Image (cartoon, helix red, strand yellow):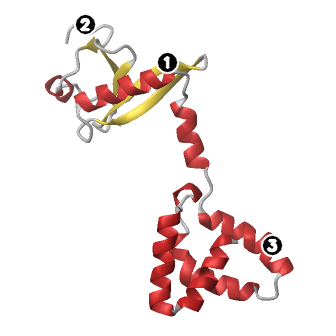
Amino acid sequence: MDDKQTNRFGFTHAALSKLPVPADKRTCYFDTRIPGFGVFCWPSGAKTFFLYRKVAGRPVRIKIGRFGDVTVDDARKEALALAGDIARGKNPVEEKRKAREESILADVWELYLEKHAKPRKRTWQEDERQWNVYLKSLKNRRLSEIHRAAVRDWHAGIGKKHGEYQANRALSLLSG
């Protein structure tokens, strides 16, 4: 290592493998080639790549991946790509947060059942039965992940197994 006081050195696989495991708190090391690109060493022995930048005037650490799962070169490329996105005005942290907060089909189903089906439909129990039999396989999908092609394949599978009428009823419920 070049400079032990500031914990800065050129990252290589060999150099990162030789880093000592901290006793009680995480230790942070920075790469000399890319500003803000670093690695955390945890007391558990895990090492995690990150990029430290200011986004919209606020300091942010963006996790890139674990050392071992991600090579040093791949982590560097990802750090450069993230730095480029930040320089172009994008906020990768905000994009990840929005993706995590996006609703899944099960959340929307609960709202539909409580706010629409139960108060307005006499056949809400049939809707619930169809959900449990045909739609539950899609329950953990984010709404943006449910595409036309996936719905077409899902509909065709129900049609082959349970008949076209039932497939159309399930599709109608999904559309609702």
From the top left corner, tell me how far across and down residue 85 is, in percent: 47, 25
> Few, some or many C-alpha atoms within 10 Å of disc 1 (few <14, some 14-19, many ≥20)?
few
Q: Are marks 2 and 3 in contact (CB under 8 Å)?
A: no
Q: Which residue is mark 2?
A: 3
* Quarter that holds the N terminus: top left
> Few, some or many C-alpha atoms within 10 Å of disc 3 (few <14, some 14-19, many ≥20)?
few
From the top left corner, tell me how far across and down residue 59 is, in percent: 54, 20
From the top left corner, tell me how far across and down residue 71 is, in percent: 23, 34
* Quarter that holds the C terminus: bottom right
Secondary structure of residue under mark 1: helix
Q: Which label's residue is closer to the chain start, 2 or 3? A: 2
The quadrant where residue 109 appears: bottom right
- In terms of depth relative to the viewer, which is nearer, 152 or 158? 152
From the top left corner, tell me how far across and down residue 23 is, in percent: 31, 29
Inspect this view and state whether residue 117 appears: yes
Q: Which label's residue is closer to the chain start, 1 or 3? A: 1
Furthest residue toward left: 14
Label 2 vs label 3: CA separation?
Answer: 64 Å
Q: Which label's residue is closer to the chain start, 1 or 2? A: 2
- In terms of depth relative to the viewer, which is nearer, 40 or 163? 163
Q: Which residue is mark 3?
A: 116
